[in-house]
Image (spheres, rainbow, N blue to C red):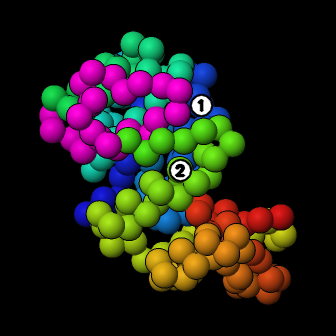
């Protein structure tokens, strides 16, 4: 069962990594992208090793910057060395690093990043038992939990190009969620 995910990424890809972490948070998965900078008394190498050892899988965010990043490649090598599940999220123009070239990546373009995030979430649903959504209402700011919609309903909304409708349990406002990432649409 996957509950914690380590996201390896280059410094230049911090905004994409944060967007991925937020999408994972919305489906109840903890991510180690944010914890990376928190424990100041521990060396960066120890923080990385701790994060990778204590997660259930590693998502490698591999953009043109990420594939040439020594840190990203070291983190992938460490994860592979301890037999950690690695899910490559690969920008279309980039090539997989040698260590994980045998894996099937989830490819993305910058314009279609939300589609790739939806595919990551779909993979997580296949690998583990996701039941809850965490949604922060853009109108009242409250955080609520709701059941994750059935995958068939999500797929229908994606194919139709529509959102998923819900209601904030606090302010009772109608909300529409992006069916790929479950992010409220303004």
The region drawn magenta spans 82-104
Q: Is residue 177 above or below residue 65?
A: below
Q: Position of residue 137 (x, y in %)?
A: 74, 69
The disc placed on residue 116 is 2
Which quadrant: the C terminus? bottom right
Q: Is residue 100 above or below residue 175?
A: above
Q: Residue at x 59, y 63 (%)?
A: 180
| Residue 102 counted in the magenta span | yes
Q: Is residue 171 above or below residue 48?
A: below
Q: Determine whether the residue tagged by mark 1 lies in a helix, strand or loop.
A: helix
For residue 140, what is the image quadrant?
bottom right
The answer to whether residue 7 of the structure is visible from this angle is no
Callout 2 crowding tier (Cα within 10 Å): few <14, some 14–19, many ≥20: many
For residue 51, what is the image quadrant?
top left
The answer to whether residue 74 of the structure is visible from this angle is yes
**Along the line of sight, the residue nearer the viewer: 118 or 185:** 118
The disc placed on residue 85 is none
The disc placed on residue 14 is 1
Marked residue nearer the N-terminal end (1 or 2)? 1
Labels 1 and 2 touching (C-beta < 8 A) = no
Q: Determine whether the residue tagged by mark 2 lies in a helix, strand or loop.
A: helix
Q: Position of residue 13 (x, y in %)?
A: 58, 28
Callout 1 crowding tier (Cα within 10 Å): few <14, some 14–19, many ≥20: some
The number of callouts visible is 2
Q: Nearer the viewer, mark 1 or mark 2?
A: 2
């Amino acid at each position: 069962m996957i509950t914690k995910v380590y996201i390896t990424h280059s410094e230049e890809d911090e905004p994409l990594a944060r967007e991925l972490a937020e999408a994972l948070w919305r489906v109840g998965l903890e991510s180690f992208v944010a914890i990376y900078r928190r424990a100041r008394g521990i060396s960066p190498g120890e923080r990385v090793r701790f994060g990778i050892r204590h997660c259930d899988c590693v998502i490698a965010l591999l953009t043109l910057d990420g594939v040439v990043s020594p840190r990203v490649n070291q983190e992938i090598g460490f994860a592979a060395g301890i037999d950690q599940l690695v899910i490559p999220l690969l920008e279309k123009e980039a090539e997989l690093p040698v260590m994980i070239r045998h894996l099937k990546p989830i490819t993305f373009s910058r314009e279609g990043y939300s589609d790739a995030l939806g595919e990551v979430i779909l993979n997580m649903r296949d690998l583990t038992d996701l039941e809850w959504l965490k949604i922060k209402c853009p109108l009242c700011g409250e955080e609520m939990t709701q059941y994750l919609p059935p995958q068939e309903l999500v797929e229908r909304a994606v194919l139709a190009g529509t959102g998923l409708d819900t209601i904030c349990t606090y302010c009772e406002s109608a909300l529409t969620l992006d069916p790929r990432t479950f992010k409220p649409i303004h």
